[in-house]
Amino acid sequence: MQLKNKCILLTGATGGIGKPLALQLAAKGAKLILVGRDSNKLETLAQQIHNKGGNAKTLVANFAEQGATQQLAQQAPLQFGNVDILINNAGVLDFILFEDQSPERIAQMIETNVTAPIQIANALMPHFKANNQGQLVMIGSILGSLGFPHYATYCASKFAIHGFSQALRRELVDTNIGVTYIAPRGVNTPMNDAATLAMLAKTGGNVDEPEKVAQIIVKAIEQQKQEVFIGQPESFFAWLNGFLPSVVSIGLKKQARLAREFAAKNKH
C-alpha cells in the first residue's frame, strides 16, 4: 500500500511510539489526524510536521469521557473528507503487584486499552464498509500473547485486543478492509517508569527504541501484514506460550521473583 495521500487517524499521537510514528507516516506523504489528550502537544507535533512539508490536523479526545469515541469517529472524516487507515495506538500501562492496583485504575486501563479502540473501530466500520476499503491497525503487545507477572491487567487488555483483531480480520475476509495487529516487546518510552527499567535491567529484559518500532509499524502497514511480533526471544516465548504454557511458567519463575521487589515499589 502506498501511504502518499492516505488519511490516517492516529490515536496516542504524542506518546512514545506515536510521535515518531506520526513523523515517519508524514514523511511518506500521508495526511494525518493526530489524536490525544493534550492540545498543546498535539499542536506542537502538527507544526513540526508542517515545517517538514507534511500535512496534519489535530483532534483532542479523552477516552475516559462518555461519548468521546463516537464524537471522534464523527469528526475525523470531516478533516480530510475521508479516513483510510485507523491506528489505535493510545494506551496505558502499569508494572505493579495486582493487589496494589486500584479498582479505578483497572477500569481506566480497560477503558483506554480495550473499550476505546474497539468502539472507534466500530464507529468507523460503516465508513470503511461504504467504501469497501480501509485498514485497522491495532498496537498490541507481546504481553497480548504472553501473560507476564506484575502486568496482569495490562496483559488482560492486550490479550483482548489480540483476540479482537483476529476475530474481526476473519469477519472481514470477503472485504477489502484489513486488520493489522502489531505486538512490540518493551519500548523505551515514558510509559516505563524507573522501577520498570530497573527490573528490565535486572532480569535481562530487552527494550527497543520507539523510532525502530515505528519503522516496523510503517512497513507492516505498507505491506498490509496481518500480525507482526517484534523482537526475539520474546516473540518465540509468546508463540511457545500458545502450545506449552506450563513450560513458559517454569521459565518465568526466576524473573517473577526478581521483578517482585521492583513491582512492590509501585502503587496506583
Image (cartoon, rainbow, N blue to C red):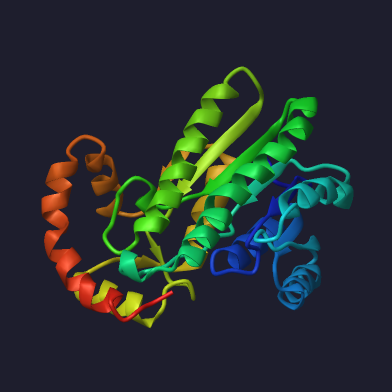
**Residue projecting furthest to the top:** 174
Specify the quadrant that holds the C terminus: bottom left
203 with respect to 238 (left or right): left
- Rendering coords of residue 139 (x, y %): 52, 51
- Rendering coords of residue 177 (x, y %): 65, 29
Question: 259 or 230: which is nearer to us?
Answer: 259
**Residue projecting furthest to the front:** 103
Count up the numbered dots: 0
Specify the quadrant that holds the N terminus: top right
- Eyeballing the image, is 194 above or below 51? below
227 with respect to 2 (left or right): left
- Eyeballing the image, is 86 above or below 178? below
Name the image quarter holding residue 126. top right
- Which residue is depicted at the point 11% across and 52% down? 250
Name the image quarter holding residue 19. bottom right
- Which residue is depicted at the point 12% across and 64% down? 254
- Which residue is depicted at the point 71% across and 76% down? 41
